[in-house]
Amino acid sequence: MSPRHAIRFYLNGELVILDDVAPDLTILDYLRVNAMLRGTKEGCAEGDCGACTVLVGRLTGEDGGEEKLQYQAINSCIRFLATLDGCDLVTVDHLSTPDGALHPVQEAMVDKHGSQCGFCTPGFVMALYAMWLNGTHADRESVLLNLQNNLCRCTGYRPIVDAALSISDYGNVDDDPLVRSSAEALARLRDLKDGKRVVIESANGRLFLPADADDLAAILAEHPEATIAAGTTDVGLWVTKMMRSIAPVVFIGHLDDLRGITVTPDAVEFGATVTYEDARPAVESHFPALVALWDRIAGTQIRNMGTICGNIANGSPIGDTPPPLIALGAEIVLRKGNVRRAVRLEDFFIAYGRQDRQPGEFVESVRIPRPDPQRLFATYKVSKRRDEDITAVLGAFNLRIEDGVVREAAIAYGGMAGIPCRARRVEAALLGQPWTLATVERAMTAYEDDFQPLSDWRASADYRMTVARNLLMRFYLASLDKTDERLAAGGVL
Amino acid sequence: MTANSFRRETLERSIKGGKGQSERHDSAHKHVAGIAEYIDDMPEPAGTLHLYIGLSKVAHGEVTRLDLDPVLAMPGVVGVLTAADVPGLNDISTVHKNDEPLLAERVVQFWGQPLFGVLAQTRGEARKAAQAARIDYAALPHVNDIAAARAAGSALVTADITFLRGDVEGNLAAAKRRVEGSIAIGGQEHFYLESQIAFAFPGEDDEVTVHSSTQHPSEVQHIVAQVLGVPFNAVTIIVRRMGGAFGGKESQANFFAAVAAVAARKFGRPVKVRPDRDDDMTMTGKRHDFVVDYTVGFDDEGRIEAVDAVLAARCGYSADLSSPVMDRALFQADNAYYYPAARLRSEPLKTHTVSNTAFRGFGAPQGMVACERWIEDIAYALGKDPLDIRKLNFYGETERNVTPYHQVVRDNILMRLVEELEDSCAYRRRRAEIIAFNKSSPVLKRGLSLVPVKHGMSFVTTAFNQAGALIHVYTDGSIHLNHGGTEMGQGLYVKIAQILADEFQVDLDLIKITATTTAKVPNTSATAASSGTDLNGMAAADAARQIKERLIAFAMEKYGVARESVAFAANTVLVGEQEFAWADFIKDAYMARVQLSAAGFYKTPDVHWDRSTASGSPFFYYAYGAACAEVVIDTLTGEYKVERVDILHDVGRSINPAIDIGQIEGAFIQAMGWLTTEELWWDERGQLRTHAPSTYKIPLASDVPPVFNVKLADWSVNKSLTIGRSKAVGEPPMMLATSVLEAMSMAVASVADYTLAPNLDAPATPERVLMAVERLKARRKPS
C-alpha cells in the first residue's frame, strides 16, 4: 500500500489535512501560532503545569469488539501534532456555545470563584471536563487524582476542587455536545482509518507513522537511527527544552496492535503503546501493590500519554516503573525486523545512558510475573512533593519468607545509582536469615556496599542513603501488620 | 403610595454588586472560556519580530568574546541586539543605582544574566539562534550564598539598617534565661503561570507603546524612557491583566519591556519577547533567602526581655528592591510581640546570583518566621506550649505597645482573634491528643501549631502612598473606570468597581473596567504592598464624589431643592419628591453642560518614616490573623502531610468576602509551598538547577489540607478611615503558613520528648524533616 503524505484529524469538529508538518511541531504551537486558537496556554512547555491541557479523542477497540471513542486530557505542549492523525482534538475554545453560553464545567468554575489570574484556568477546565466526561468526578479523592497535573498559583485550589465536585449541579453529561455527537464523531474517525503508513518530509526532517507493528519494524530496519516516540512525554522535552532535532522520528503511540495487555496465569504482558492509564485496570487486578505507585507517576495528562515500555526504553535512572518490575523479575521483548529476543529487565540497564538495545531494535512489550500471594511485595516512592514529582528514592521489595526465614529476596532501587538496580548485598544479608528486626538492622548496614548515590537538587547523597535504608525498615514494620495502619496500607501518608 | 414611602422603598432597595457582596471576578467568564486576553494572545501585526535573549553561562566573569555571526546566520534571523544598541542609559535598576545593565557590557555577574538579543521571524527561530552564539569568558571568583558571601567579605548591595529601642545589652545581661540560635530560610520562585512578556510597538517621532505584564506600569514607563533616552511622555504602557505576578512583575518586568522597546526602536517593527519557563526562572529575581542569627533574653515565664538579631539575606548581584525588602523583614521581626529592648540589624549581602526582588510579603514573612522561631525556642527551653509564650508576649492595648521602630500599636485585636480561633479549632484538646498519639505511634508523629500574624499596612516609602483614578460617565449612564492599580488575579478591578457602584448607587454591570495605562492615570505606584484597594479604591471614590457633587449642584439649581434632598439610591437619583432613573438624570445633566468626568486622587494620611533614625509611624494600620495547622510526619523518610488548617483572618469590613477568602487561601497555600516543598538549588558553578516545575515543586491540589476552615473575623472594623473600613488582604495571610512549619517542628520535637528545639530550617522538605529527626534522635538523652 502506498504511504499517505499528510495527516488528517478533526479540530473542534472541523477536518484538518496537513501535508507539511514538521516532525517537532507541538500541538500547542500549532494551535497558538498556526491555527490562532489562543485559549490554550503555555505555562511550562514540559508537561508539568497543565495550562495547555486539551482533549484528544481516539478510537479504541474493546477487546476486538465494538469500537469506542475515548476522550482523554493530554498536555499539548509536549505532544507532537503528527500524533493526532486519526484523532479528534478538542480545545477550550470549543467549550462555550458560539453565543457565549458557558459549559457546565465553566459555569461551576465561575460560580465557585475557581479562577483568579485565569492563566491556568483553561487547563483546569479541560482537565475537569475530561474527568466529567469519563464519569469520575464523584469524590474528592478522584478529583485530586485528576488534578495532579494542573498547577494553580493563585487560588490555593479549594474553590477549584469545590467546582469539580459540583459540575453536575450545572448540567447533565448526557447533554454534553461531545457525548451527543459521539456516534457521528466515531464514524468520522473510522472513515479516517485507511491502514496506511504516513510519511511526511518537511524542512525540519522526516516523520513516520507506521501502519502497524510490522511496518514499524520495517521502517526501523531502514532507519535504525530514527527516534522512536510513543507518548512523547520524554522526547517532547528534547524539542521544547533541549531544542534538539528528533528527525527522523517514528511515532508509534497510535499502534493498536502494540496496545495489547495479555494476562496469563503467571504473568501480564504489556505492549509498547500501553499507557499508564491503559494499564490501570490490569494493575488494579493483578498488581494491587502497585496502585499507590501508579497514582504517583506524574499526573493524569502524562499518564494518559506515557507508556510503560517508554519508561523502560528511555533508560532513566529515576523512572518509576523499573525498580518494582525488576523486583518482580520482569523481562522485555526487543524486536528488530522479525527477530525477537527476551532480556531480563535488570540486564537491560547497563550503565547511565546505556541500555542493551541495538540500533533498529525496539521494545515490543514487557512481561511482568504476577506476584506470588505468598510473598511480601511493596514499592515505596519518596519525592520532595508527594504527587507529580520525580523520584528521589524508590525502593521495591519482593521477599519469600518461609517459616519465618527469608528464602528469596529481590530488592531494587531507583535514584540510588546511574541505573535502576538491585541491592545485591542487602539481599544477601537477608537471605537465609530470620525475618526479624535484628536481621533488618543488620541488612541496613549493607546499603553502603551496594550504593554510592549522588547529591543533586532532588536530594543529597546522605538523605538518599538514609531513606533507602529506612525503606527496608518501613517494609519490615508494615509486614508485621501491627504498626501504624497507614504504614501497613502501603506506607504512604 | 405616598411620595415619601416610595422614596423610602427606593432607599431600601439595593444595587447589584455593591460593597460587601461576593461578586465573582470580573473576568471569570472569560478565564474559563480562554478568551481573557493575555499579551501572548494578542494577534501579532504583520512584520512583528520575535526577540529571544542570550544568557550568560558563567556566574561571574569577563566576556572576552561575544561572536554573534553564527547567530545571524541562523534561519529566520533578522538581527541581533547588544548593549551598544541601547540609545539611552544601559541601566534598568529600579532604585536607579546604575548597577543593573539592560544587556551586560563586559562583566557578567550571575549565571543567566542577559547578554544579547536575537530577532527572528518566529519565536522558535530566535530561541534556537540564541544558542548559536560563540562566547568566551575569563572566569572570576563567585560567591553563591550567604555563608560564602560572609567568608569572602562580600560587599553589601545596599545600605544596611539597625532598628534599636531600649537597652539591649542591659536587658540581655539582666534576663534570667536566654536562647541563642540561627535559622536558614529559603527563597522562593514566584511561579506566576504566565511567564514574563512584553510587546512593544514603535510609534511616530520618539513614541513607543508597550504592552507589559507588569505590576508597575509607571516604573516600566520610566525605565523604557531611560533606555531609549526619551522623555516619559513618549512612552505609553498598557496592562490589561497579568497571569499572576506575586511581586515578580514589579521590578522584574522592566527588563522585558525595555529590551523589547529598544529592539522595536532599532528595527522599526513591533517586537514581542517571551522567555521560556526555564529562562524566566533563571533570569528573574526571587524571594530573598535569609539566615537569621539571634539572641533572646526572657524570664522564667517566657516573657521576652530583649531581642538581638541579625537578618542576613542573599541579595544577588544588584540592589534591586533589597533595601526595602530587608527593611520590611526588620519591621515584622516583632510579629505580634512586644520587645522591651530590641536591636534588629540587616545585612544585605551581594552574591553572584540573580538579583532577588519583591515577593508577596516583601521580607515580612522571613522576619516573622525568624521571630516565631525564637518564640518556639523559648517554649522548648521552658517546656511550655508555644501558644502560651505567644500570648504572654502579645502587644498590649495601652501599654507594652511600642514597636522596635517606635510606632505605637493602637488597633490590636489579636487576643480576641487568637482566643476565638483557639476555641473554634479546639486547640488545647487536640494538642493533648496529639501528645498522647505521639507517645504510642513509633513512626508517624503529629504536630500542631497556632500562630498569630500582625502586618503593617502602607508602603514604608511614604511617597508611594498615593493613587489616582479616572472616571467617565457617558450620556447613556454607563461608566468607564480606570485607575492606577493593576490586575494580576487578586480581584482588584472588581473590588474597585464595587466601590464605584456603591458610590454612584448603580448596578455593577453599568461599569466598564478598563486596562491600566500610564496614558490615563499618571505617576502611579506599584500594585504592591497589598495596597491596591486601599489606595485606588479611595481615588476612585474621590473621582465619583467629585462627579456626584456636580450632579448634586445641578439638581439643587434645576429643582430648587436643598442639598439634603438629593440622594443617590438603587440606580436612581432622588431629588426632593421626584425620582429619576440614573441614565435619564445623567442625560439631563449633560444637556445642562455638567462635566461628567473626573480624576480622583488619594494619599494616605498620618504616615511617616525616617530611615536615618529608624523611627516613625510608617503604617496606617495593622491587619491581623491567626492560623492553626496540624501535620503528620513519617520519621523514616521525612515525608509529611498537612492534615488540617483553621484560619481566622481580619480584613476589616470586607469589600468582597469571596475575593478576600480567595486571597487568604491562595496566600496560605503559596506560603505553605515556600516553607515545605519549594526549594531553590544552585550548583557549585552558580547555576540555578531548579528552574522549571519538573524540579521546583509548588503545591498541588492534593497538598491542600483536607480540612481547611477559613473564616473572616467579621466583627472587625478598621479603626483607621480606609475605604469602607476594610483592610488590605494580599500579603498578611502569607505569614499564616508559619503555623505549618512550626507544626512540623513539634512533630520533629516529639522524638526527643519536646525537650530539644528542633531547629528545622525552611523549606522543610522531607529531607530537612528527616535530617532534623535524625539529629534530635542522636542528641536526645538516653532514657
Image: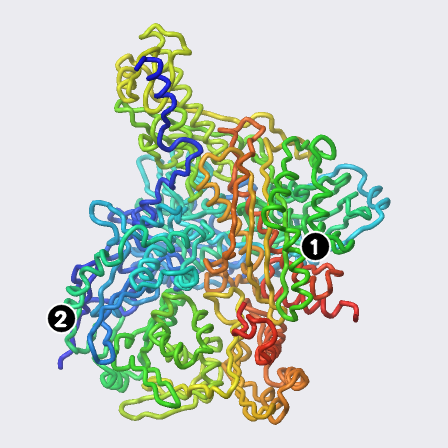
What's the residue at 35%, 42% (across, down)? Answer: B27
Q: Position of residue B644 (x, y in %)?
A: 55, 55
Packing grade of label 1 (10 A; few <14, some 14-19, many >=20) is few
Query: Residue tagged by mark 2?
Result: A191
What's the residue at 23%, 81% (across, down)? Answer: A212
Q: Is residue B677 left or right of residue B481?
A: right
Residue A177: tell me if it is visible.
Answer: yes
Q: Quadrant of the N terminus of chain B?
A: top left
Query: Residue tagged by mark 1?
Result: B153
Regarding mark 1 in the picture, which secondary structure is present there? loop
Q: Position of residue B368 (x, y in %)?
A: 64, 47
| Placement of A231 over or under B388, stated as above or below | below
Packing grade of label 2 (10 A; few <14, some 14-19, many >=20) is few
Regarding mark 2 in the picture, which secondary structure is present there? helix
Q: Position of residue A384 (x, y in %)?
A: 54, 66
Q: Quick one: B129 or B569, which is closer to the camera?
A: B569
Q: Amino acid at mark 2?
A: Asp
- Discs 1 and 2 share one subunit: no
**Marks 1/2: CA–CA distance:** 73 Å
What's the residue at 40%, 34% (across, down)? Answer: B518
Q: Quadrant of the C terminus of chain B?
A: bottom right
Q: Quick one: A180 or B520, which is closer to the camera?
A: A180
Which chain letter goes with mark 1? B
Q: Amino acid at mark 1?
A: Gly
What's the residue at 77%, 50% (across, down)? Answer: B295
Residue B132: tell me if it is visible.
Answer: no
| Placement of B661 over or under B743, stated as above or below | above
Q: Position of residue B363 (x, y in %)?
A: 60, 46
Colour scheme in use: rainbow
